[in-house]
Amino acid sequence: MNTAVKKGAEDPVEPVDAVDQLIEQYDPESNFRRLAGLAAMFVTIVSVSLSGWHVYTAGFGLHNEIAHRAIHLSVVLGLCFLVFPRQKPLAGAWEWILPITLGSFYILFGWWLVQALGADLPESTALIFMALLTAVALLTLPIKALDGSHTSIPIRDWFFAAISSGFSLYLLVFFDEIYIQRPGDHSNLDYMVGVFSIVMVVEVTRRTMGIFLPLLAVGVVLYGIFGPYLPGDLAHRGYSVPRVIAHLYKGTEGIYGIPVGVVATFVFHFVLFGIMAQLTGLGQLFVNLATIVAGRYSGGPAKVSVVSSGMFGMISGSPIANTVTTGVMTIPLMKRVGFSPRFAGGVEASASCGGQITPPIMGAASFIMAETLGIPYSHLVLIAIIPAAAHYFAILLMVHLESKRLKLVGMDTSEIPNAWKVLASSWHLFIPLIVMVTLLLMQYTPFLAAFWGIILCVVCSWIPKLMGKYGRNMAGMAIGPRALLVGMEMGAKSALGIGAACACVGFVLGILTLTGMGFKFSSFILDVSETVALMVKTVDVWNWIELSQMTIFFGLLFTAIACIIMGAGVPTTPTYIILASIVAPTLAQLDVPQLATHMFVFYFGVLADVTPPVALAAFAAAGIARSEPMRTGMTAFRLSMGKAVMPFAFVYSPVLLLINFNWPDFLHAMISTLVALIGLSVAYAGYFGKQIGWAAFIALNLLSVSLVFGNPIVTMISVPAILLILYWHWREGRSTLQLA
């Protein structure tokens, strides 16, 4: 395997093998087996076929909606067991306690179904069903002898793959009978296959995402069954096991709900485009352009990291892949110019998370948001420009202040590429991205835009060769047959984890709609927010802030905390789907636009990958920086706090999201939010000409937060106050420097 060119004698860029290992270690969605032989050939054929089928449907039309989702899941879930090894065992006794708990649930769930069906289910059939289910439950236990190796697929996983593919194939084979001839009439076989569908979705999610999301899914299923026995407002009428199975398996609000539908159309296509774009060399081009733009300034490599992560985020919605891909080049450079290892890792991780909110290709959650709200994805692309710009502005400002505090200089001119040479050698790499963005803005469907983006990535990669001697010095790699197969295989593998997670999240959404649990939690959040708002309102003697605004604020604050806590165990997309479905009804009662609510949850959900104790993007960056992971995670979290005020501004000033747009309100909101962003960034950077003391830190936090309410009187007081604090620190710092 080739290694990257060294940038410094003492701190070389990581080898490609090491990069792959980091991605596999810290990104559970990319922890693939390194297969060989017939198993590798089989996985390659299936993966390439899946990508090819998706490219075909993107360009030439979709199948029946349910059938399309079933085909997608039948391949995706089966591949998950073949591609992903069992995750590392949990610490201590938990290695066995949690799997035994889940296995017991599987057996009990099947037994409850047998009891519910009663005499309608033949005894022999019931025995065979329970025997097979018990075998599956036992095979899920962490028996090391059944694990096989990282380079081979054990028999157990072939068995699991067959079952996981089978329950979707069952719907496809008997589609006419199930959905046309007897809609709403469920057979015993439907129910039994439905049990295996629930069991295998939980298991495949545990395989790809860890234990937290599967436990949450099992918890909500139990909630749907045992509703009458729960205390207080948590209680509901309860639903029979057959009803729960039919709702989750055969309905359009369970396993095959909107999240899976979006993944099977938009997300998969854009993931594949991102892989193809990287193969052509677009990622390296972004790094070169970032170096040209930001490398010469104070703390140059850190600013290159932020800018390149923003550019790379336009084609990659994966924060961990973004961190590692750009981090192997930028983190060693940051360390070499004087940044501490943990700060270098924190900058890269924090910046890379912004890729999920950076148009035109954002994270999977953005596509689900567009589908849920019923708005064109092209509209969401325009809306996301300001949130993405705010994210990177805040990080750039904090990086700049840290550079000034350390008195760092920019990169040497010899390390900065020539702008004209870069553009002259790489102009053809922009064509797919430009065409795709143009199609999106022209309101063509996202999957059609992705289709042409993928096709043009392959076609345009051959431009240097077609130009003959004139293309000898052009950058990029031509995507030949072998590279095309590799790209299609990696595209399919990269989309497996999110597909499994969205199927599992379907449990939560299905039970939410079935039981009305979302409205109950919404009411609880609203009641608590109103109570706290009333307490705080007693201090507002000047009556500057309305009670409704204060209620919204605390509702948002509790939501933000929930996002951060849940984000410690669940990736961004599931966090967004779950919390948005709960919080949206609450804020709708307070006349908050749904788009603002969803963007709020999405924005804070992005913090998932830099939220200790499970800050996966930060841990990956720490692996490159050779720093302590937890301290790196805390640094990345601190660097992300500068923009924490932005989501609140979306709610109080929805004009920032182009809702009811008018220039006076927009300019007022932009000025207030920008000053608040600067105030918070300076506070958490801890430096502005001189060190920020505790008094100034508290004042900047309070004044910055006050600006989100959009109150003109508060704006006239807080903006000058923040600017005055900053001016005083700048003047004092300059005076100290002159005396020195």
Image (cartoon, rainbow, N blue to C red):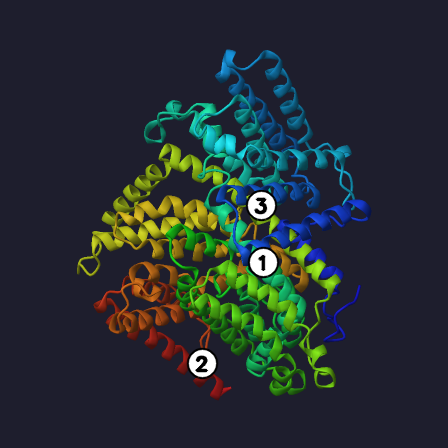
Classify residue 341 by image quadrant: bottom right
Say if 144 sits above or below 732 in the image.
Answer: above
Using the image, tell me which numbered label, if any, was put on residue 72: 3
Q: Residue at x 53, y 36 (%)?
A: 215
Q: Which is nearer the N-term, disc 2 or disc 1?
A: 1
Q: Position of residue 469 (x, y in %)?
A: 74, 85
Say if 609 sits above or below 688 in the image.
Answer: above
In the displayed structure, does residue 216 sit left or right of residue 731?
Answer: right
Q: Which residue is mark 2?
A: 733
Q: Residue at x 57, y 74 (%)?
A: 431
Amino acid type at mark 3: His
In the displayed structure, does residue 95 sit left or right of residue 608?
Answer: right
Q: Residue furthest left?
A: 542
Look at the image and tell me whether residue 559 can be seen: yes
Contact, CB < 8 Å: mark 3 with mark 1?
Answer: no
Along the line of sight, the residue nearer the viewer: 655 or 645:
655
Along the line of sight, the residue nearer the viewer: 188 or 519:
188
Q: Position of residue 150 (x, y in %)?
A: 76, 45
Amino acid type at mark 1: Val
Q: Residue at x 67, y 37 (%)?
A: 161
Look at the numbered disc 2 and give the secondary structure of its residue: helix
Using the image, tell me which numbered label, if any, was put on residue 271: 1
